Amino acid sequence: RDAVRRDNICHRSVFVVLRGWEAQDAVLLRTNDDDASSCKTLNDMVHNGEAYQDAAERLIQQQLQIKELRIGKSGKIPSKDDAPTLVQHFRFHFKDAMSCIWGQLYECWCDHGDVVAQDMKRVSLADLVAMSADDDHAHALRLYLQRLHDIKVNRRMLKGYSSSDLSSYEMRPKPKVIFFDCDDTLYFDGWKTANQLTAKINEWCMNEVGLPDGAAYELYKKHGTALKGLLAEGLLDNTDEAIDEFLRKVHDIPIKDLIQPDPKLRSMLASLDPSIARFIFTASISDHAQRCIEALGVADMFEPTIIDVKACHLETKHALASFHRAMEIAGITNPEDCLFFDDSIKNIQTARQVGWRGILVGRIGRDSGTAISTEHAEVELDTIHDMRDVFPELFSS
């Protein structure tokens, strides 16, 4: 032990957080004074040849005089009848000038009144956020708070992301940019706007090129967008003038009659960390998206450049090329720096494929009218207004 501390030798260690049913919003930590920043988890080195769990059980027996432990499951509060219960959460690495460890964090659920250890202090989970220490104990507790929040919001531990491996758990990196879809994500009007756009496209195809009713939707299904279908099948001249005219006409709908100002959305966006860039990334044209965010009263909350279908060279939004183009416009090279909010499962799937963190907004599908979900979404929200509750770390207040 002396050599490990003196020479800062990397070693294994266990950390145990004490929880109890009579105060589920608090933990018991060891302290010698009233300064919350000095609070420590129960902690000990793992002996040579000893398993992490064996070390945790040994520590609890030595420090708390608890000799029999049940083994619980991470993410589930054990029954009081099962007390005391040991729950494994994650493994992590920590290194500074004083220590180098591979740590394993556990919860021990017990009746606090039965704990025999001295110098213990009850600390609320909320107060743990304010801890000023920056040692291995504080790092373990910050990871623990993040993990508890992950469980609370049903965050998926998606393979390939730095904060999703519980065998090497890390603090989630702050995104450098947030991409917001516009229609049915920043607002939801029961698909009234989307239905009017669909009707305008169908109307154009019938009136301008003589296609039968419903043919526009068939073009969409075959080619990804009606516009790509019209170009591929020679029904629309492949010139900037013809394409712009088509896009202008099919987006000519009365936005102000459909979308109302959203003060709650504005307040939420205004309190986002100002160091994180915000872009509108839409499958429509920039003029349509601009009119939508103006109607919502949030036009000044985003970067002036709107990433639209023309910026993506007329590719479908769920094409890989569109996501790479969005990163290029935003000046981002690391996909994990991108957080993405969208109502489309296809778009969320592509975001995952590229390496973005995709968040599904809305749990009902427009086409099916039934519940939707995707294993590729990090989190699923009912509405964009849930963003603050799920991502409190992104807000400056």
Image: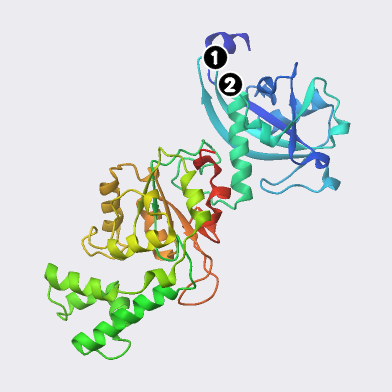
Q: Residues within 10 Å of mark 2 (few under 14, many from 20)?
A: some
Q: Residue at x 63, y 25 (%)?
A: 137
Where does label 2 land, which residue? Answer: 135
**Which of the labelled discs sits on residue 98, or is there none?**
1
Q: Name the quadrant of the C terminus.
A: top right
Instruction: Give, as a three-letter code, the residue at label 1.
Output: Met
Q: Quadrant of residue 228?
A: bottom left
Front residue (pair 112, 281): 281
**Rendered view: 146 above or below 229:** above
Distance, label 1 to label 2, CA atoms, is 8 Å
Give left or right: position of 191 versus 327. Answer: right
**Quarter location, residue 44:** top right
Residue 76 appears in view: yes
Residue at point 60%, 41% (across, down): 147
Circle 1 — which element?
A: loop
Q: Is residue 14 above or below residue 215?
A: above
Q: Residue at x 38, y 70 (%)?
A: 255
Residue 393 image offset from top left, x and y in percent? 53, 40
**Quarter of the image where one finds residue 3:** top right
The residue type indicated by label 2 comes to: Asp
- Marks 1/2 in contact by CB < 8 Å: the verdict is yes
